[in-house]
């Protein structure tokens, strides 16, 4: 699995950076040599808020274990969830629904090794994920989260500003929502709180709190880093056409 994933990453990177070479991303601050100045100040929208628009890539290393930076005990499982997580690790994620082209869901989309694009629109922020061609809408018009939503892999999201921090709250997730490739379980009780900050042009810091009382005895928080990927674009992702991998996922 890891060898195949490495090949996929290399191919995706090579393809992405081969697109639209003569059309550099407009509005990107540049150094004297023409390269993007990722240390430049973060852009702002007309109302003075940080503008998160652009193409972003997740810092590598969290695909398998989103909680890899946490100390023992910070992720405290309910007994059934601990047993399930151990089973998934021991069997090398053989039962991963994404292997059958099911959407990755949130927060897993934050740690898969594929880029995503953030778009600012009127009353909402839209995230386009290259993986499985999925998308997410974050409504900024003051609405509340739905009371009894139809479950969705990406959930339902509303956002508001606290100073320069974009705070996003989400609910309404599917029951079998894997949080990473190892299979940290998520349930329909998951409530996700994300705090996005853009300290400069080239970085987004994300503090993400996972509150799922059905699977964990207490909330837990992870910190992720996204880096800007200017002068390229998302490419087509095909999963379910001519798929031949699932039958070879035999586990241990």
Image (cartoon, rainbow, N blue to C red):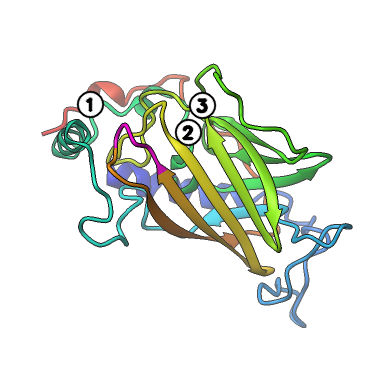
- Residue 142 in the image, given as x and y percentages of width and height: 75, 38
The residue tagged 1 is 248
Discs 1/2, front: 2
Q: Earlier in the sequence, mark 3 or mark 2?
A: 2
Q: Is residue 15 left or right of residue 179?
A: right
Instruction: Give the structural element (helix, strand or loop) at label 3.
Output: loop
Q: How many marks?
A: 3
User: Residue 250: which quarter of the image?
Assistant: top left
The answer to whether the residues at label 3 and label 2 have Cβ atoms under 8 Å apart is no
The residue tagged 2 is 105
Image vertical order of residue 228 relative to residue 155, above or below: below
Q: Earlier in the sequence, mark 1 or mark 2?
A: 2
The residue tagged 3 is 172
Discs 3/2, front: 3
Mark 2 Cα-neighbour bin, 10 Å: few <14, some 14–19, many ≥20: many
| Residue range highlighted in magenta | 211-215
Q: Quadrant of the C terminus?
A: top left
- Residue 15 in the image, given as x and y percentages of width and height: 57, 47
Q: Is residue 78 left or right of residue 152?
A: left
C-alpha span from label 3 to label 2: 11 Å
Q: Is residue 92 left or right of residue 181?
A: left
Image vertical order of residue 141 relative to residue 118, above or below: above
Residue 213 falls within the magenta-colored stretch: yes
Image vertical order of residue 230 relative to residue 65, above or below: below
- Residue 37 in the image, given as x and y percentages of width and height: 70, 75
Residue at 32% of width from left, 62% of height from top? 69
Front residue of 120/218: it is: 218
């Amino acid at each position: 699995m890891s060898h195949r994933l490495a090949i996929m990453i290399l191919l995706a990177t090579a393809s992405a950076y081969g697109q639209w070479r003569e059309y550099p991303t407009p509005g990107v601050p540049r150094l004297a040599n023409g390269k993007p100045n990722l240390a430049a100040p973060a852009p702002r929208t007309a109302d003075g808020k940080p503008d998160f628009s652009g193409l972003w890539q997740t810092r590598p290393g969290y695909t398998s274990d989103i909680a890899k930076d946490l100390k023992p005990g910070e992720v405290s499982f309910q007994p059934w969830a601990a047993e399930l997580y151990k089973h998934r690790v021991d069997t090398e994620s053989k039962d991963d629904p994404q292997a059958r082209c099911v959407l990755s869901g949130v927060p897993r989309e934050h740690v898969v090794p594929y880029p995503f694009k953030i778009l600012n629109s009127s009353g909402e922020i839209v995230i386009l994920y290259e993986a499985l061609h999925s998308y997410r809408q974050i409504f900024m018009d003051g609405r509340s989260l739905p009371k009894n939503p139809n479950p969705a892999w990406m959930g339902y999201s509303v956002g508001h500003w606290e100073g320069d921090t974009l705070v996003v709250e989400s609910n309404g997730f599917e029951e079998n929502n894997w949080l990473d490739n190892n299979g940290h379980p998520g349930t329909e009780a998951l409530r996700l709180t994300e705090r996005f900050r853009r300290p400069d042009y080239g970085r987004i810091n994300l503090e993400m709190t996972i509150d799922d009382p059905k699977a964990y005895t207490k909330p837990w928080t992870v910190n992720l880093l996204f880096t800007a990927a200017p002068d390229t674009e998302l490419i087509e992702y095909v999963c379910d056409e001519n798929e031949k991998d699932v039958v070879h996922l035999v586990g241990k």
